[in-house]
Amino acid sequence: MAGVELLDIVKRFKNETVLEGVTLTVAEGETLVLFGPSGAGKTVLLRLIAGVVEPDGGTVRLDGRDMRDVPPELRNIGMAFQNFALFPHMNAFDNIASPLAARRKTAERVSEGVERVARLLKIDQVLTHRPRALSNGQKQRTALARALAASPSLLLLDDPLRNVDAKLRFEMRLELPRLLAAEGATTLYVTQDYKEAMALADRIAVMFRGRIAQLGSPAEVYLSPASLEIARLFGDPAINVLDVTPEQDSQGPFVRLSRLRAPIDPGLHHAVGKDCSLGLRPEAIRFVGGETTGAIPVTIEAETPLNEKIVTLVTTARGREILVSRPSGEPGPAQGQAHIAVDSAHALLFDRRTGLRIEPSRDDADVRGAAA
Amino acid sequence: MEHTSTAERILRGIAIGAVVLFFIFPIFWILLMSFQTNETILRNPPSIAFVPTISNYVALLTGRLETAAGTLDISFMQNLKNSVILSVSSVAVALLLGVPAAYAFARHRFRGSEDIAFTLLSFRFAPPLLIVLPLALYFQDVGLADTYIGLIWVYQLICLPLILWIVRGYFEDIPADVEYAYRIAGHSWFATFRKIALPLAGPGIAAAGLLAFIFAWNNFVFALVLGSADKQPVTVGALAFVTASGIQFGQIAAAIVLSIAPTLALAIYAQRYLVEGLSLGAVKG
Amino acid sequence: MAATAEMDSLARRRSRIGTRALPYLLSLPALLVCIGVLIPFFTAVYYSLQRYRLSQPWAREMNWGETYWQLLTDPSFWNTLQVSLSYTVLTVGLQLVLGLGIALLLQKRTRLNNFVSILLLLPLMTAPALAALMWKLMTDPNFGILSYFVSLIGIEDFRWASSPDTALLTVVLVDTWVYTPFIMILLLAGLRSLPRQPFEAAALDGVPRSFVFLRITLPMLTPYILTAALFRLLESIQQFDIIYAMTQGGPGDTLMVFQVEAYLNFFQSTNVGRSAALLLILWAITFAISNLFIKNWLRLRERTHEEV
């Protein structure tokens, strides 16, 4: 039995359609991350599932039950909001206790329950404080504790780390997967941060303009993004995009980078002659000595250390800007002229007109035919 | 603005002094009159040197006025009682009816909700006699003439739009997410209304109630048309008192003081919310 | 199993009806009051189309627009209109100028200014009918302090509200005493909510103050001024309490504004039809103003609540 089933959900506000036909299934116990730019409809989707917003079309099923006309209080959901939405006139304890109190637990069970999640989230020291007296991090933990308190079967977390500082966000990113695994609840997690998405998700649903553009494991979305738009959002520094037109010779399909022949996946022979965009992850480019075959001469423009890696901005002879990334310890040219080599065989190719990725065909006959 | 010259500061001081004098002097003067006998009031030229007496207040409180011509009964205490009954119950009814409606208008945009809200608002600005004169005839037929209930009903005309629009603004200022969070935690909408919306809008509701009280207390025309002597509040009663007693100026002044004291005291107490109330929630102070 | 499913769906249907009907239920009382207002309103329309005197119930009949026609051809109606308009223009104009002046005077948030602005609330919170009585006592020819002051500057026998020459002036004075603070506190709130940058920039550039006032302060304050002025316009053209308590419309017909005239028509001459027609004409005027007002008021309200 599935945790959450969404069938063709449509939602309009006035004349604007914010969700157009979203269909999605989240398995029981799974953590699914809704990822996308703001305005993509992620938050509205969560609210529809929670029942505080009604869909204009489509069906929401939780544990196989149609949720039409089931009010939010009967859906057994825990939800954390981006702005925390704590009850300002209640202290942290009462905030966290509210789902337990609603389930008519005895006072003893309520305080047991509150203390359990408070310990888990390390806020047992501030339970008597009103939200106003809490730091942002404590607010966020209180909001999470409130969502978890009644051990709901479904957790909806709406960008809970959005409004906390970088350090806390880093800590929580490490802590949350363990927490969610321990709770065992089906989880829908909204975020705009791809690292958060990669760290937490069993699967990621990438949303654009009220639709799900891609659904897959973090590795799938990162390695085989369905479109250039998705590829640009995943990865930091962002993916390099070069306009190319694939050609073909006796050795198979290739693209020209600075007049040099760069072979691409043989399965991409059907893209030959099309206007394409080539997506090169900065990690797939490395500095090499000038004598290496296929080395492209570049000029170093700037170098930025970025956490565990160093990002270098270079320009090619034709003036194209390219980002190169290497692990922090690795030496590299500091300035002046240098050469780079591109692992073009693993580059991503997108149709320049539609923005969709061109998938290499895996038909052996095709590949053999092309090689002949 | 930093370079205010001495001359300018003096001019400002004089201007502020004049403003205070114009607006406060009448209240001050009537207060002085209320502690004087007719003799000192009628002195010419007038003077602020006199031996204060509370005889005017005593006469009002006991309801009996001993004059050279004989004893005069004053029903002013009844007027004061009527003012309290009418204002308190009107505000109570308006809160009871208006607060849930304000919540509905703030949170559930439903068909016709704006129409109702605006009809109430626009009739807040219609000539009161237009509504009250036909009612005077109706009330005769249905037995509401000269009853507290009939008057309290009519007072809703001023209290209800006030409560509705001010409290609605306060409900709208509560983030919807806070209410959503409470419902998702497992509480019915009614529990959410009681435990979240009401406490958070509490100060605003109290302020709206105080203002509605002031407006109800100060109302003149409703009771003038619809109430007879034993149901009339101080505004109408004081006027009748002037006509009846004629020359008892000290008592008239004392009656005025007693009539305006409650609203003035409340106004100072609630002054933080007055701007908002007077603009029906459009401007915050 | 089937039974629970059935109960489940029943409970759900009930909750569905509950949630859909809820807002209507909540606003039902307000709706009823609304209807309660509309019924007398339409009754008034009905009366205005009749020849209807309480003293001559036998002569009551529909005369359609005749009452209105009689009104329009009656000089006393034009007097009423003229008095009402004069009263409105004088009070609102005077109060706007005074209110704006005082608001500017008290603009800075100092203790003294805050104290004064609270003091100025007192006249506004005084019942207008009682305010009229207060001024009546102060303008009494025998012992009124204002009469005394006037005699000090050499004007003997100034008769205030009892003389046709000065009656309008007197009630305008009372109205100004009561309502100037209304305009003042609205404009003060407006002034204090204005963004500071334009003023700081102007001060840095050494722009003359008159220019700052005309080109920055006034335009930015316009929504507040409009809302306050329209609000006062609506109340002023309907003024009843002050005038009735002061002179009952007299002396003669000097102060016969709409509502006083309608009141006296109803209770003294028991001419219900004429009274209703007068009030409906007044209503038409106020309705036009109130639409303007509500538009401005809504804009201001939205702005205020967005800031929160």
Image (tube, coloured by chain):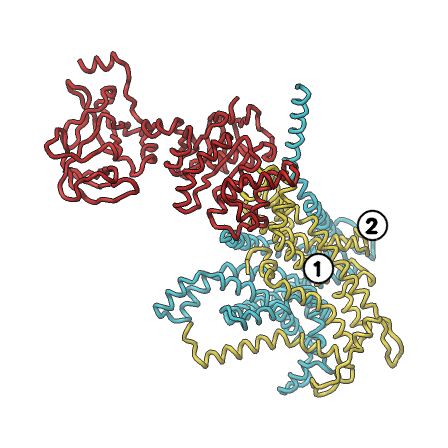
Residue lying at 20% horizontally and 31% vertically, measured from the top left: A342
Comparing C5 with B222, the one in front is C5
Mark 2 chain:
B
Q: Colour of chain A?
A: red
Q: Residue A211: image x %, image y %?
A: 42, 30
Question: Is residue B90 rendered to the left or right of residue A186?
Answer: right
Q: Which mark is residue B216?
A: 1
Residue lying at 22% horizontally and 25% vertically, measured from the top left: A345
Mark 1 chain:
B
Residue farthest to the left? A291
State which quadrant residue B5 falls in: bottom left
Q: State yes or no: discs 2 and 1 in contact (Cβ < 8 Å).
A: no
Q: Spatial distance from mark 2 to mark 1, Cα to Cα?
A: 25 Å
Comparing C291 with A323, the one in front is A323
* Residue on which disc 2 sits: B141
The letter of the cyan chain is C
Q: Residue C43: image x %, image y %?
A: 73, 49
User: Which residue type does callout 1 highlight?
Assistant: Ala
Q: Residue C211: image x %, image y %?
A: 40, 68
Going from N to C along the chain, the mark reached first, 2 or 1, is 2
| Residue C197 in the image: above or below residue B110 | below
Task: Say if residue C63 shows up in the picture.
Answer: no
Comparing C279 with B101, the one in front is B101
The letter of the yellow chain is B
Is the C terminus of chain B in the top left, top right, bottom left or bottom right quadrant? Answer: bottom right
